Image (cartoon, rainbow, N blue to C red):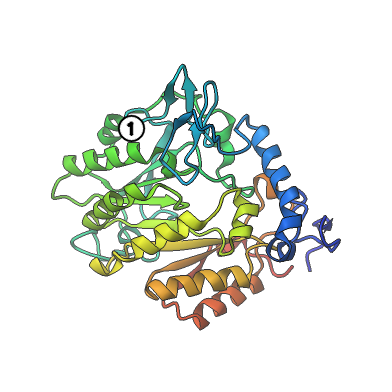
Amino acid sequence: MVTKFKKVKCLVCGKESFLISSTLGVCGECIREDFEKAKVFINKAHEKTREDFNLPPKSPRDNQGIPCHFCVNSCRISSGEKSFCGLRKNEEGRLKGASSSKGYLSWYYDNLPTNCVADWVCAGGSGAGYPSFSHTKGPEYGYKNLAVFYYGCSFNCLFCQNWHWREDIFARQSISPEELIDAVDARTSCICFFGGDPSCQIDHSLRVARGAREKRKDQILRICWETNGSLSEKFLDEMAKISLESGGCIKFDLKAWNEEVNLALCGVSNKRTLENFKYLSSFTDKRPQPPFLIASTLLVPGYVDEEEVRGIARFITSLNPEIPYALLAFYPQFYMHDLPTTSKNHVRRCLEVCKKEGLKNVRAGNIHLLSDEY
C-alpha cells in the first residue's frame, strides 16, 4: 500500500484519496458523472497552469482575428494576441512565428533501437518490413533516428512529460526544413516528429519529410509522427501517403475515451483525435507490415482507468483489431506530480480489458516505473 502520497479531498463529492490530483481537485468519478460541477475547478486549474507560462487561457476566438487552421483549436487571433500553442502572434495584421520555413524545435540523433512507443512493432525496433523498410531482420543496431522535437502543443496536459518547451518557445533561433534535411545522413534510417506536438507545426514537418525523402530516394528512410492526433484533417492524406510509402508509422496518443476526462486532463476535446484516428485506420490494410497506425495511452492513476481503456480498446477493435496498442506507465510530472506511478494491478486489469475487447496486439510499456500497489 502506498503511504507517501497525501490524500486530497474531491471538491465535488468530498471523497479523500491519494488518487486525486491537488491541481485538479476533483476525482475521476466526478469528472465522468458530475462534469457540470467539476468543470468549474477543471477550468480554473487549466487557466492557472497556462498563466504560469504566459500562454492564452483558452483558444482565442475573435471573429475579426486572423484564423489559424493547423489544429483542433482553430484559433482566431486578434492584434497583439498569441495562438493557444504560443507559436504564432498577430502583429499588425500578420501572423508571426512558426511557419513552413521556420520551425521552433530541437533535434538530435537517437541510436536505434530507440525508446519508441512503437518499438516492438516498428521497422527500426523489430525489423518488421525487412528488406523493403528495414536494414536488418531484427533491431537496426548501427543505425539512427533523427528525432525532431517540436515546441508548442494543441493540448494542455497537466501530466506533460516534456513540458520544458513552455519556458521559452523562442529561446532558440528557428530552424529551416533544409537544416533538418541536411542532418539526414547514410546512417539515418528514420525520422520521428514529436514534441510538444507536431500538429501545430505540421506544415514544417511535411516539408522536411518531402525533402528528406527526395534526398534519400530509393533508400530506406522511414517517416513517423507521434502526436495527440488533433491536427486539421486536411493534412492527414499527405501524412498517410508519406508514412505508408516510407515504412514509417503514425502514433496517436489517445489520452482518454470520455471527452470529459480528456478535457480535465488535457484542457481540449478529444473528438478530433478520435475522428482522425478513425480516418487513418482506413489505410491500415494498405501496408500490414510494419504497422502503419499505432495507439498508446498513459495510465494516469485515478483518472485513466479500466473504463477509459475499455472505451478506447472497443473503439480500436471496431476499426481494426490488429492495430497495435501500448499501455504506458505513468510517472508523476508537471502539475500532476503528487500522484503515484501506475501500479502493476492497474496495468494487469487494463491488459485484461483489451484482451476481452478483442485487440490482438497489446503491450505494457515503461514497466520499470510500475509500483507494487496503490
The 10 Å Cα crowd at callout 1, few under 14, some 14 to 19, many 20 or more, is: some
Q: Residue at x 46, y 60 (%)?
A: 274
The residue where tag 1 is placed is 100
Residue 174 position, x and y percent, is: 40, 25
Looking at the picture, does residue 225 appear above or below residue 84?
A: below
Depth order, front residue of 176/116: 176
Residue 319 position, x and y percent, is: 39, 72
Task: Give the number of marks.
Answer: 1
Residue 248 position, x and y percent, is: 30, 55
Seen as rendered, the residue at the extreme front is 63
Label 1 sits on a secondary structure element that is: loop
Looking at the picture, does residue 1 appear above or below residue 245?
A: below
Depth order, front residue of 186/95: 95
Q: Residue at x 66, y 67 (%)?
A: 343
Seen as rendered, the residue at the extreme left is 218
Looking at the picture, does residue 201 appear above or below residue 3?
A: above
Q: Is residue 158 visible?
A: yes
Residue 90 position, x and y percent, is: 48, 23
Image quarter of the N terminus: bottom right
Q: Is residue 339 visible?
A: no
Seen as rendered, the residue at the extreme bottom is 356
Depth order, front residue of 292/41: 41
Q: Residue at x 71, y 66 (%)?
A: 33
Depth order, front residue of 280/333: 280
Image quarter of the C terminus: bottom right
Q: Residue at x 51, y 24 (%)?
A: 171
Q: Which amino acid type corresponds to the residue marked 1 in the rendered image?
A: Ser
